[in-house]
Image (cartoon, rainbow, N blue to C red):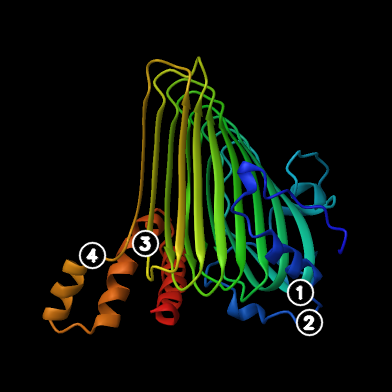
């Protein structure tokens, strides 16, 4: 991996990426993968387990998910490393499946995997992915939602170290709905990269979550939502909490095509610095070519409210506990959008464990 060709940090889109951490993770030696039980959520339904990007059939119960060759091309500079092997979920018209759980166990080094989700008209699915262990986990997922299809996607990045890079390419058809929530609450660095196209009328697209960083860790997201049809709606709600000398970066963009009238696009990017030595970078962008739209963005970075801290302490709450309560509330609105209670509670518990270590 010493000749690994990575994007240049001189590029605007990659200027915040922790590419040295990616290189180190790719070159790290293989070790022992973490225990599966530590990553599984207590939900029924199909399950896929990948160890260093290789399918573990003995511990999987794939149900409607197929595992095998996935051939497509992508211009994304990291997605091109992914081989032809991967997984695919294809549901027919009005089909519904139990929540699908995908667990990625890493032991070091680089591993690459492709995923594909294709939902026919009025089909519905929920996919939960968890990343644990170490090394460079590089993932590309292509998603196609036909008329009225609904997909909920929840991704937990809780690797102890290393790097996780995710590239999602999503096409949302007429009256279809896509909602994705990401949580970065491990010790790894990360890059969450999304390209969402709202191609059908009355379609809905949502992508957001929380990035929690400490030490010298760096995490980032770079998401673009392109509205190409009328009456589309999109939400991007991201929260970042940075401690010590770490950095969290959020870049969210909305493009509205000339014919995409009555688009409603909203971005909310907010960050909290637990110490002033930490960094939160925010970059909201809007490019609008239609004249009948409702688009808004907000971006704020600050520290915990001293008045709120004083109030809680005056009621007998110790300062560390008060800081944890306020930070938890700050992160919660980006995780409350997860529809399944068990999954949402697991994400909140991951965030709570991070807060206990950071505060």
In this view, the residue in front, 218 or 183, is: 218
* Residue 210 locus on image (x, y percent): 45, 59
For label 3, the residue is 272
For label 1, the residue is 108
Disc 1 packing (10 Å; few <14; some 14–19; many ≥20): many
N-terminal of the two: label 1 or label 2?
Answer: 2
In this view, the residue in front, 16 or 46, is: 16
Disc 2 packing (10 Å; few <14; some 14–19; many ≥20): few
Quadrant including the C terminus: bottom left
The CA distance from mark 2 to mark 4 is 43 Å
* Residue 341 locus on image (x, y percent): 40, 63
N-terminal of the two: label 3 or label 4?
Answer: 3
Q: Is residue 163 left or right of residue 354?
A: right
Q: Secondary structure at mark 2?
A: loop
- Mark 1 touching mark 3, by CB under 8 A? no
- Mark 3 touching mark 4, by CB under 8 A? no
The CA distance from mark 3 to mark 4 is 10 Å
* Residue 143 locus on image (x, y percent): 64, 41
N-terminal of the two: label 1 or label 3?
Answer: 1
For label 2, the residue is 31
Residue at position x 41%, y 25% from top?
A: 263
N-terminal of the two: label 4 or label 1?
Answer: 1
Disc 3 packing (10 Å; few <14; some 14–19; many ≥20): many
Quadrant including the N terminus: bottom right
For label 4, the residue is 305
> Is residue 4 among the parts visible in the rendering?
yes
Residue at position x 67%, y 50% from top?
A: 9
From this view, report whether residue 75 is shown above or below residue 255. Answer: below
Q: Nearer the viewer, mark 2 or mark 3?
A: 3
The CA distance from mark 1 to mark 3 is 31 Å
């Amino acid at each position: 991996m010493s000749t690994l060709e990575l994007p240049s940090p001189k590029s605007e889109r990659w200027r915040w990426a922790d590419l040295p951490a990616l290189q180190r993770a790719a070159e790290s030696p293989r070790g022992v993968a973490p225990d599966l039980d530590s990553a599984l959520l207590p939900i029924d339904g199909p399950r896929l387990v990948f160890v260093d990007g290789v399918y573990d059939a003995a511990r999987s119960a794939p149900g409607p998910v197929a595992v095998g060759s996935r051939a497509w091309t992508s211009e994304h500079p990291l997605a091109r490393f992914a081989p032809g092997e991967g997984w695919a979920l294809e549901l027919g018209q009005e089909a519904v499946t139990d929540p699908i759980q995908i667990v990625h166990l890493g032991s070091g080094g680089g591993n690459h995997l492709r995923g594909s989700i294709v939902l026919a008209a009025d089909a519905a699915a929920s996919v939960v992915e968890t990343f644990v262990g170490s090394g460079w986990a590089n993932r590309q997922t292509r998603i196609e939602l036909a008329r009225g299809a609904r997909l909920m996607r929840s991704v937990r990045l809780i690797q102890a170290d290393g790097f996780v890079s995710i590239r999602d390419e999503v096409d949302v058809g007429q009256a279809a709905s896509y909602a994705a929530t990401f949580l970065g609450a491990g010790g790894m660095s990360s890059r969450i990269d999304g390209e969402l196209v709202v191609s059908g009328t009355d379609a809905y697209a949502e992508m957001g979550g929380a990035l929690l960083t400490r030490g010298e860790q760096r995490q980032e997201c770079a998401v673009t939502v392109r509205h190409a049809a009328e009456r589309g709606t999109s939400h991007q709600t991201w929260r970042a909490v940075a401690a010590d000398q770490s950095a969290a970066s959020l870049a969210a963009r909305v493009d509205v095509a000339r014919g995409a009238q009555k688009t409603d696009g909203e971005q909310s990017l907010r960050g909290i610095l637990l110490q002033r030595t930490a960094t939160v970078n925010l970059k909201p962008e809007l490019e609008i070519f239609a004249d009948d739209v409702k688009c808004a963005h907000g971006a704020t970075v600050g520290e915990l409210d001293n008045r709120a801290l004083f109030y809680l302490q005056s009621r007998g709450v110790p300062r560390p506990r008060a800081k944890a309560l306020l930070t938890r509330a700050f992160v919660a609105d980006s995780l409350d959008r997860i529809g399944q209670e068990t999954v949402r509670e697991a994400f909140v518990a991951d965030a709570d464990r991070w807060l206990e270590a950071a505060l």
